[in-house]
Structures are given as structure tokens and as C-alpha cells.
Amino acid sequence: MLLLIATIVTWFLNVSLGSVSIPFDEILGMIFSDGNSKESWRYIIMDYRIPKAFTSVLAGSGLAVSGMLMQTMFRNPLAGPYVLGLSSGASLGVALVLMGASLFGGIAATAVFSSWGLVIASSVGSLLVLLAVMLASIRLKDTMAILIIGLMFASLSSAVVSVLAYFSPAAQLQQYVFWSYGSVGDLSWNELGVLAFFWFLGTGIAIYSIKNLNSLLLGEQYARSLGMNIGKNRALLIISTSFLAGSITAFAGPIAFVGLAVPHLIRQVIPVNDHKILLPAVILGGAILMLLCDILAQLPGTDLTLPINAITSLVGAPVVIWLLVRKRKFLF
Amino acid sequence: MQKNVEQNIVLQTKDLQTGYRKKDRETVISSGIDVSVQERELVAVIGVNGVGKSTFLRTLSGIQPELGGKVLINGHDRKEISSEKLAALISLVLTEQPISKNLGVAELVALGRQPYTNWIGNLSAEDRGQVKKALQLVNIGDIQHKKCYELSDGQLQKVLIARALAQDTPIMILDEPTSHLDMYHKAQVLKLLKQLTDQTGKAILFATHEINLALELCDKIILMKPDGVIQGSPEELIQKRAFESIFPEDLIFFDPATRSFRIKS
């Protein structure tokens, strides 16, 4: 499909553009054979740009999938990991690990600093927020109320983060602040492996749930009457969403709007509701958007790199506004 | 002969008690419900607002657990039927559900085939056949390429009925399928239900406020009152003067001659 080709093209584009300009044929040579290029170029490509491109692919697609799952699960077109406070919950988890370790003494500080600890803390953070929002959504059937609850949890967790930050030593605070700008670079191949593990887990569950996601398009009562086990399915979707949002936020920082905007953009390009088609399309769409945002963030040809979170917001927020204004009804 | 009639009973309740259970507090809404529905029967559930029609239907279909008594489907206790098997026995048409209006008509009807499709939901030739048949039975072939947000309330109601038909179940339960519709479309939907019982042999049970139409079209009426639930054919219930006490008597009265409610002058 066209989206797949577009993904591959943007991936190569992403790898070839950066602060140091490296000729494209040299890159191809490095990837597909043992071409004898300059050692520094080789290092930039193999240990920086290629992991970064893979991270972009995983982060973009994972966030987009979790956004799609949440939109179907909450029956709310404005749901997404960032909007409903999942990213904030994950941030709180990360903040507790990065800054809390010094406050509460070095309880297993060495263990939690490993990438697994960061991912687990961040996944648990997003899981807790998601569970809270879910409980609220069962109590209040109102879609607006759910969004407001998500916002409230976002403010709550950022308040806790501020308190932590206030009492933290400068070095750790800086570490957290840089993390919160978001970055898809800086991942080693090992960390990339951890991220990929959670990505496959989350996406695997989503693929397993495709049929039930389609039933959910009719609402929970109909889904139940079609033989779906609501409780089990809800638990699976919650786990999948928090793994995806949590692990991505842990490694790449809180990235805004990709989860919310991609499912809607995809529906503009291919008008489908069937998750059998929607899911792979959203995966590819998320990857493309993230790769493009990362190219922009690198400002090719200059030495500057912008925070990726700023770029996705700059791209994503107008998209959401445009969708809201243009469409008579914001459907999902 | 007697035995034969009993074999045709698809849905039966025995001393059923409906209501809500919250932690350890029970709110009973109706109790002692003993009704039975046979195949090919069109049954209206009638009662004033808040008497527990929806709760009764939700309990029948298993969305809500019963507080006491039993629901028997083809003679089997509903509690012992798995949700997958139940999906092939009872189909629902509900009102005011958060249905994704982005769905196409044919797409929505095809979702009725979910209990029969494989793990990823691919439609087999038989599934497609059933969808086509459902669209034909409800006579909405002409709008099958439209999206749900383009439909009128009456059309959407028919689409939802077609979806339930595609589910291919011996029992269909509808909760107020005629609300929000004008007089013509109310009659059209109920007439359609009557035709469907004849054409497909299904037992169709629906809650409604259209007493006049129900008296004309239904084989049986389940009348829910705060003091108890009775069932019978329209004639039996009229003879028993059952309708005269369902509403407060200051505004309207039941006129047995015209089989309808009239305003007191």
C-alpha cells in the first residue's frame, strides 16, 4: 500500500537528513554493505540516526495506536494519550524515578535507573491515570466530563511533579526537564530493544482485539449482545494502551497530539471504520508523522535541534483545530 | 396438542425479579414476572414511564443480571448459556446508544454477523448472504451505501433492525423502537416487525408507548403495572379491563369500543 512506501521513503529521508550532511549513496552503502566510509559518518548513521529513526517509527506508531484504541474505547473523538492525561501520569512515574530517588533515599536507585525501571514506572503512571479516567467514564457517561477528568489528572500529576522538582537537586531537575522536552534520539540499541518489546506487546494485544474493537463501534451494550466479554476486553485494551503510552513516554518524553491527530488524519485519507484496515493504516500514519516531525526538529543543515514535543504540538494542534472547524460533526 | 404448544415457547420467565444491585443494597423494580413468548409471536411490553419496561427487557437479554427467578431460553436457564451462545439466540435493538455515526449502513448491518465470524471478523459468503437478506427484509437496499449520520431517525431505526436480523437469532428484543418517530414511521416500524415475525418465524418482543398500534398488531401484550405484570392477547386484556387502570384517571380513559385511549371531555 501507498502508506507503506511513504513510510519507507520518510524513514530514509529521516536517516539522511541531519546536522551533518552525509551523501545519500554513502548511507545506502553503510546500511546494505560494509562500504568503507568515514568512521565519524559511520558512527553518526549507525549509532545515532538509525536508532533515532527506529525510535521515531515506534513512538509515532505506538502513540497513534494508543490514541485509536482510546477513541474507540471511550467512544470519544477527542481521546488520546496526551489529552486524557496518560502522558502526564507517565511523566509523574518518570519524575518519581529521576527526582524522587534522591528524596526518598537510594532505594534500589541503581535498579530503577535502568531503562526497564523507567518504562515500568512510566507505564504504571499511565495505567493509574487510565484506570481513574475509566472509572470516571463508567460513572459519568458524558464525553465532555471524561475529557475534563483527564485534564484534572494531568494538572494533578504535574502539580506533584512541580513539588518534586522544587525539592530536587539541580542536576536531576535538569535531567527531568530535558526528558520532558521529548526526544527520539539518545536511545541506545539496547533501550530501543526494550521499547520494541513493549511496542510489540501493546500492538499485539491491539491486533488480537480487532474484532472486539469493531463491536465497540456500536457501544458497549450492543457489543455485549454480540457475545463480547466487556470486562476482559476492557482490561486488555487498558493494558495495551498503557504499555504503548507508558513505554514511549519513558524513552521519548511526553509527545503531544500524535495519538489524537493520526487516527483522524487517516480517516480523512482512507474513510474506514473497520479496525482491520484502520490499525495498520494508523501504525504507518503515526510512523510517517513522527519521522517528519523529527526531520523538522533536526533543522537539517544547521547545528540546532528543537524539542520534538514542540514540533508535534505545532503540527498537531492546528490539525485538531482544523478538523473541529471543518467538520460539521466531529465523528470517530 | 398441548405438548406441541409448549415446545414452541422460546422465551419464558419464572418468578422473575428485576432491579439493580449495588454493593449489598438491592433495588427491586418488578417481581413475580411469569410470562412466555412463542416463536412467530409479536409481543408488546406496555406500561407507564418508570414502571420497569427497559429493566425487564435488559434482564431478559442478559445485559443486567436478574435479582431472583429465572429466564428460560428454549427451556435452558439463561445464566448457564455462555455469552457467545447467547449472541446467537437473542439480538437487540436499543435506543440512544453511542453508535459511531461514521459507520456505513452495510457496515453496521454486517456487525450483526460478529458472533459467527472468525477471530479477526472476516465475512464469509454465508455472512454476506445474511447481510443482504437482512437489508432486503427491512427494505433498505437503496440506502446501504450511505453513512449513518446521513440517515433520518426512521431510517436509522430500520438499519438497527436489519443489524439485529443479520444476527440471525430466534428471539429479537427491541427497547422502544418507535420513540422519536412520527406517527407514520411508528406504524411503519411496527408493521415491519409484524411482517418479520411472519416471514422469519422469530419471536419479537418490544417495549412501546403506542398502545393503540400494539392492540392492532400484536399477538400478545405484556402489561406492566406497579402492582404486577400480566400477559394476554389484546382481546383477553380488553375483556379483563386491564388497560383501564394503567394511567391516572383524570385525563384519559380506555374506550373498549374503539380499542383506544381517548381524552376525557
Image (cartoon, coloured by chain):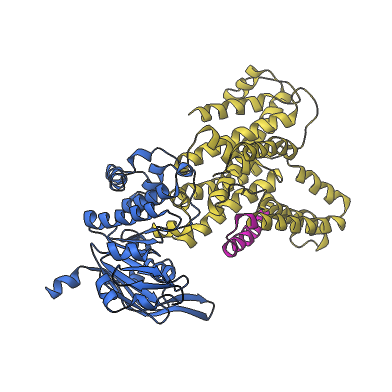
Chain colours: A yellow, B blue
Quadrant location, the C terminus of chain B: bottom left
- Residue A215 position, x and y percent, is 44, 52
Q: Give the magenta range.
A: A122-145
Residue A232 visible from this viewpoint: yes
Q: Which of the 4 quarters of the picture holds residue B164?
A: bottom left
**Is any atom of residue B120 visible in this view?**
no
- List x then y, in percent, for residue B204: 30, 61
Q: Main secondary structure of the magenta part?
A: helix
Q: Is residue A274 above or below residue A149?
A: above
Tell me the quadrant of the picture where the N terminus of chain B can be found: bottom left
Q: Is residue A62 left or right of residue B14?
A: right
B172 displayed left or right of A181: left
Q: Is residue B157 magenta?
A: no
**Outermost front residue:** B265
Locate residue B247, reporting x and y percent. Answer: 43, 75
Q: Nearer the viewer, residue B112 or A35?
A: B112
Residue B21 to residue B193: above or below: below
Total count of labels: 0
Where residue A80 sits in the image (x, y, percent)? 62, 48
Q: For the point 37% across and 52% down, which residue is it?
A: B184
Residue in front for this viewpoint, A224 or A4: A224
| Residue occupying the point 41% across, 50% down | B154
Residue at image coords 69%, 32%: A294
Q: Which residue corresponds to the image point at 42% horizontal and 53% vertical from the top-left?
A: B182
Q: Is residue A141 magenta?
A: yes
Q: Quadrant of residue A144?
A: bottom right
Q: Nearer the viewer, residue A1 or A268?
A: A268
Compared to A267, does B91 lie above or below? below
